[in-house]
Image (cartoon, rainbow, N blue to C red):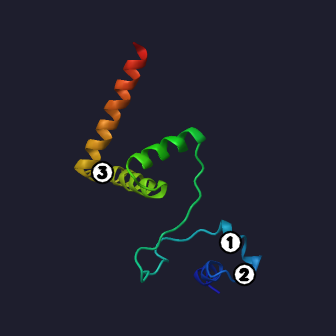
Amino acid sequence: MSRKELLDKVLAGDSVDHSYGDPAEWRVEPGVFEPHPEGEVMVGRSLRLPAQTYERVMAVANERRMSFSALLRVWVEEGLAAADGADADPVTALRRNLNLAQQAADQLAHRA
């Protein structure tokens, strides 16, 4: 049985032979996902954040009227684009620069 077949069984809720290892430790190789008839396949991953960071992310998400996951997807895509050296969306770049300017102004206000 291939790893994809095993993964399909786990995703379907079927029992699997654990001699293949713990399904929670399986890694999915890029490109194994087939097109989904209802749109893009989403992969769930666990993310641990310090409570203070989580609260800050939630505040930004609420301010933008987005879900936590949607905001993180935007930030991940922006980070990947930056890592690839791609030009950022001008609105995204402006928002980032405004956020940085506000942070600098806040820090200066606390020094006074």
Left or right position of 6 against 98: right
The residue singled out by tag 1 in the image is 23
Question: At 53% from the left edge and 42% from the top edge, which residue is drawn?
Answer: 55
Residue under numbered circle 3:
85
Label 1 element class: helix
Q: CA distance from mark 2 to mark 3?
A: 43 Å
Report the front residue among 33 and 45. 45
- 87 on left or right of 105: left
Whole-angstrom CA distance, mark 2 to mark 1, is: 9 Å
In 3D space, how far apart are the residues under numbered discs 3 and 1 (Cα atoms)? 35 Å
Rendered view: 63 above or below 16: above
Residue type at tag 2: Val
Which residue is rendered at x = 29% and y = 38% of the image? 97
Which quadrant does the N terminus fall into? bottom right
Q: Which residue is mark 2?
A: 16
**Residue 108: % across, % down:** 37, 19
* Label pair 2/1, CB-CB below 8 angstroms: yes
**Circle nearer the N terminus (2, 3):** 2
Q: Secondary structure at mark 2?
A: loop
Residue 53, above or below 42: above
Residue sitting nearer the eye, 2 or 75: 75
Tell me: residue 63, above or below residue 73: above
**For the residues carrying marks 3 and 1, which lies nearer the camera in this image?**
1
**Amino acid identity at mark 1:** Pro
Q: Earlier in the sequence, mark 2 or mark 1?
A: 2
The answer to whether residue 106 is left or right of residue 33 is left
Question: Which numbered disc covers residue 97?
Answer: none
